[in-house]
Image: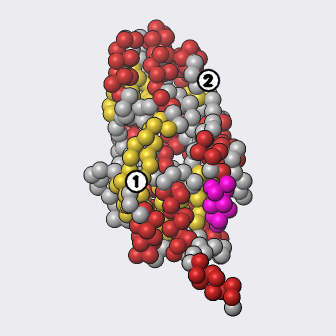
Amino acid sequence: MRIALVAEDYYPQLGGIPEHVHHLALELNRRGHDTIVITARMGDSLDAPFVRRIGRSIVIYANGGMARITAGWRLTEQMARVLREHRTEVMHVHGGLSPVLGIIGPWAARRVGIPVVATHHSWFPRSIGYRLFKRPLQTLLDQHAASIAVSSAAIDAMGRYFTAPWEIIPNGVDVDLFHDRGHPAATASGDHPRLLFLGRLEPRTGLDVVLSAMPKIMARFPGAELIVAGGGPWLKHYRKYAARLGARVTFLGRVLEERPALYRSADIYLCPTSRASFGVTLIEAMGCGAPIVASDLPAFREVAGNEAVLVPAADPDAWAEATIALLADPARRDAMSRAGREAAAVFAWPRVADQLLAVYQRALGTPVVRPTARRSRRSKAAAAAT
């Protein structure tokens, strides 16, 4: 099968969608399918052979954090040309109905006559754009061969504006990479517990909540250290804030290959984000055996509710109390590590890819509605006269 994965967010940007798209492409190609990723140019990047780039990505602020949109001349034509050159049979759009590639991708697919499968990855409280353009976007959604969401939370967000025969297929995780590899059994943390935050440094990921909780944690565990793995425009702000608090914090900057080792070395993984539709880092941490304290969000309850301690997203005192209680209970942390490793296996890429391939096969049997060619007024009048 010849498959095109279309994504506004992709490497070198890090995040749940880039991880999902890249590893899905690897899994599909490993199985013998000819899969490409179509995304925007993002400066200098060392790409895998299956990556195709059009236009140029621009960073904007949206939904409580940084987002990307693609700018360029005749993007639909560029996309259609890539599809023809690849002889694509089915398109899978990640971030369906999201500008820009989530919209022009399906337009280009209609031009070349191939079906579109769309996965919706986001949760948001409201969308002015969806409210204003609800009718044309619903029409575009109706033309998709399949509409997938990564969780019930993503369906709830999209369902405020659109109707579709939604089906849930979660994000996948590389369980061979994110594995415990002999994660040490939990012990009494003493005075040197190691806490981990991993994510982009922007308001919605909630690092300020964990930093605010650190003085209280350090009062109980004086040697407690918070490892912050991630980059972003708020890095300088968070460094200054940590210094003002007197918290012991190590900022590593952007990480990629180091992530499994960081999870394995953590006594607790902290995920204080305030907005999420899934929780890829939760699955990665569980696979590596790291106990988790996370925000009490619907998506996190769905993914890791039984294997994590869930607390209010914006309450530093609650975060401090939950972290202290878990650090003081090695038996509970050990049980959470074992349960998390078992739960992560459900999201292994072979399982997720099987579900998606079944959708692709079904989509290939769906008739594609091609755009109607425009006729001039003269040709219309001639036709009416005959």
Please name the amino acid that badge 1 sits on. Ala
Q: What secondary structure is found at the residue carrying circle 1? A: strand
Q: Is residue 150 above or below residue 298?
A: below
Q: Is residue 153 magenta?
A: no
Please name the amino acid that badge 2 sits on. Pro
Report the span colored magenta: 135-147
Q: Is residue 143 magenta?
A: yes
- Left/right placement of residue 39 relative to residue 314 reads left
Q: At x 53% / y 37%, what residue is drawn?
A: 63
- Left/right placement of residue 29 relative to residue 332 reads left
Please name whichever residue, 270 or 40, is drawn nearer the observer in this view of the structure: 40
- Left/right placement of residue 39 relative to residue 104 reads left
Please name whichever residue, 356 or 369, is drawn nearer the observer in this view of the structure: 369
Q: Circle 1 is placed at which residue position?
A: 71
Q: Is residue 47 above or below residue 214?
A: below
- Left/right placement of residue 339 relative to residue 161 reads left
Q: Position of residue 32 (x, y in %)?
A: 46, 72
Q: At x 38% / y 17%, what residue is drawn?
A: 242
For the C terminus, the quadrant is bottom right
Please name whichever residue, 220 or 188, is drawn nearer the observer in this view of the structure: 220
Classed neighbour count for the residue bearing mark 1: other residues with Cα under 10 Å, few (<14), some (14–19), many (≥20):
some
Q: What secondary structure is found at the residue carrying circle 2? A: loop
Classed neighbour count for the residue bearing mark 2: other residues with Cα under 10 Å, few (<14), some (14–19), many (≥20):
some
Which of discs 1 and 2 lies nearer the camera? The answer is 1
Q: At x 72% / y 53%, what residue is drawn?
A: 163
Give the number of callouts. Answer: 2
Q: Position of residue 276 (x, y in %)?
A: 57, 38
Q: Circle 2 is placed at which residue position?
A: 312
- Tag on residue 205? none
Q: Position of residue 338 (x, y in %)?
A: 57, 37
